[in-house]
Amino acid sequence: MVEVINRELIPLGVRLPQTDRDVVGGYFIWLTLPESVQGAVLAQRANDEENVVVAQGDIFEVPGDTEHLGTAFGNDIRICFAWEDEDMLAEGISRLATVISKMQDGTCEQVARPGTTEASAKKFW
């Protein structure tokens, strides 16, 4: 999956934040998006347009802790790879790249539907 992320998402400005570690997670990959792409909007668009479900990063924020550097996750998403086949994961990453490309070139709406982070988290879980 990281190979597909490197091929499809890194050229779009997406970053894998902890690439210097041998192990960077269990069942999830955390991705930091380019400044122009909000995680909540990407999560909505990916679901609506490409049938891909990702978790917007801000549902993992600790309430009241967003004033510290590195604790606000509006430009992040989390991808789970626990139960999908590798081919399906690669397809999902490619579809995600399609949505990010549309958002960057202006052919995709950039406004999240009204809602709170708490409501988004409850809907996701």
Image: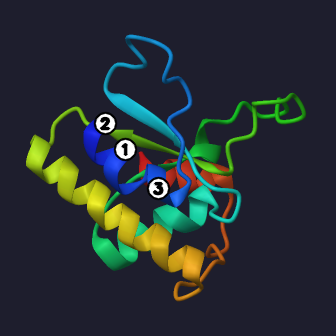
Left or right: 124 as drawn, with respect to 92:
right
Q: Give the distance between the C-alpha atoms of the residues marked 2 and 1, in whole angstroms.
A: 6 Å
The relative height of residue 13 versus residue 79 in the rendered view (above or below) is: below
Residue 38 in the image, given as x and y percentages of width and height: 64, 61
Q: Secondary structure at mark 2?
A: helix
Residue 59 in the image, given as x and y percentages of width and height: 60, 44
- 3 and 2 marks in contact (CB < 8 Å): no
Instruction: Please state which amino acid type lies under the numbered disc 2.
Output: Val
Q: Give the distance between the C-alpha atoms of the residues marked 3 and 2, in whole angstroms.
A: 13 Å
- At 39% from the left and 10% from the top, the residue drawn is 22
- At 30% from the left and 73% from the top, the residue drawn is 50
Residue at the extreme right: 67
Residue 66 in the image, given as x and y percentages of width and height: 83, 36
Disc on res. 2: 2
The C terminus: image quadrant: top left
Report the residue marked by disc 1.
6
Report the residue marked by disc 3.
11
